[in-house]
Amino acid sequence: MEQTKNNDKQPENRVWCCAWGLLKRQPNDNCSAKDVEGLAQGNGKPKEFIITGGNKPQLKIVHISPTEGNAFPHECSHQLPGMGIHNVALSSDNNCISAVSMDGNLMLVNVLGGIRLPRVTHCHVSNIWSTAFSRNPDCVYAGSGSGHIFKYDTTLGKLQYSYDTDRCENILGLAISGDQRLVGATDYEGNFTLIDGCTGKVLRRRNYTKPLRRLVYDQLMRYALAACDDKTIKLIDLPSGRLRETLPAHDAIVMSVDVSQDGLRFVSGAFDGSIKVWDVRTTKSALCFQCNHNKNLWDVAFNKLSNKISVVGDGKGLGVYYCLGNREMMLV
């Protein structure tokens, strides 16, 4: 009964993570003549979708500008076991979602077909905090609460490798290079750790005092970005792992950061709902606006085409903005 009375304090729609994908349609043996004709006329262009996770044990998939030709409706959901989902990643082929639940479980979910593996672990008790893919969709990485990073195959969920950051802390941010040679991790104690993906050797470690919540690499592996609780963004050189610049970013904790696929911009989001789009060349904020439809902001992400940004938090849940030049327009 008390929970009902306090609904104004605990928004029902709480969304904690998001990731973009592209659904590519190709003609096959089951395509009708009408379908093939439609593909030839451009109807087979990739369809954008957004994956979100939140306080409910499910993944939602939302299409942008849906049409009758879409493989699934404007919004669909995959029900999952356990508790809510706070971290997601999508494989490079846009087919497999890795999701981390609040009870520390790692799950693999097919975008179209639903649950592939309901529990990926080699331990009796799972304690997973973050997840990431490299360019290879055959393996997935998971950051644990003990400072270890596990690499699993995506077919059977078998452990392939275990990396040790030598810091027994919750790994909040995880980034993997496309060739899997650089494994990066950030944790709740503010440690950034760079590991050789082939040997497991720690190449560089630095402590930034405050928690580092999100870690991303740019597509050309020139730098890494880490979102920090000290209201800044850490710009870290790759492959050296040395700090290149600390960017004063927001007036609140920086919850998330992401790099556009074209490598020209990156976006940051703070807990107070402020969002900034940065120019990579100048490391200056080119665009700043406030996300007013969410009470607390949890995650931001660039789409694959580098022209839209998704924002999730407590309140409306999902918001999508155009990011063209110096203007923005909310879509969802």
Image (tube, helix red, strand yellow):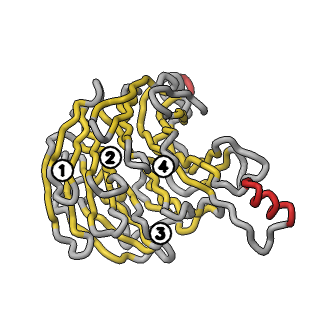
Asked if the residues shown at circle 1 and circle 4 are in contact, with their CB atoms under 8 angstroms apart, the answer is no
How far apart are the two marked residues, 3 and 1, measured between alpha carbons? 28 Å
Q: Amino acid at mark 1?
A: Asn
Query: At label 2, which amino acid type do we have?
Result: Arg
Question: Which comes sooner in the sequence, label 3 or label 1?
Answer: 3
Q: Badge 2 is on which residue?
A: 214
Q: Pointer 1: what residue?
A: 191
Whether residue 155 is visible to the viewer of this picture, yes or no, is: yes
Judged by depth in the image, the label closer to the viewer, 3 or 1, is 3
Q: Earlier in the sequence, mark 1 or mark 4?
A: 4
- From the image, which quarter does the N terminus lie in? top right
Closer to the camera: disc 1 or disc 4?
A: 1
Q: Earlier in the sequence, mark 2 or mark 1?
A: 1
Q: Residue at x 77, y 53 (%)?
A: 69
- Foreground residue among 241 and 122: 241
Q: Amino acid at mark 3?
A: Pro
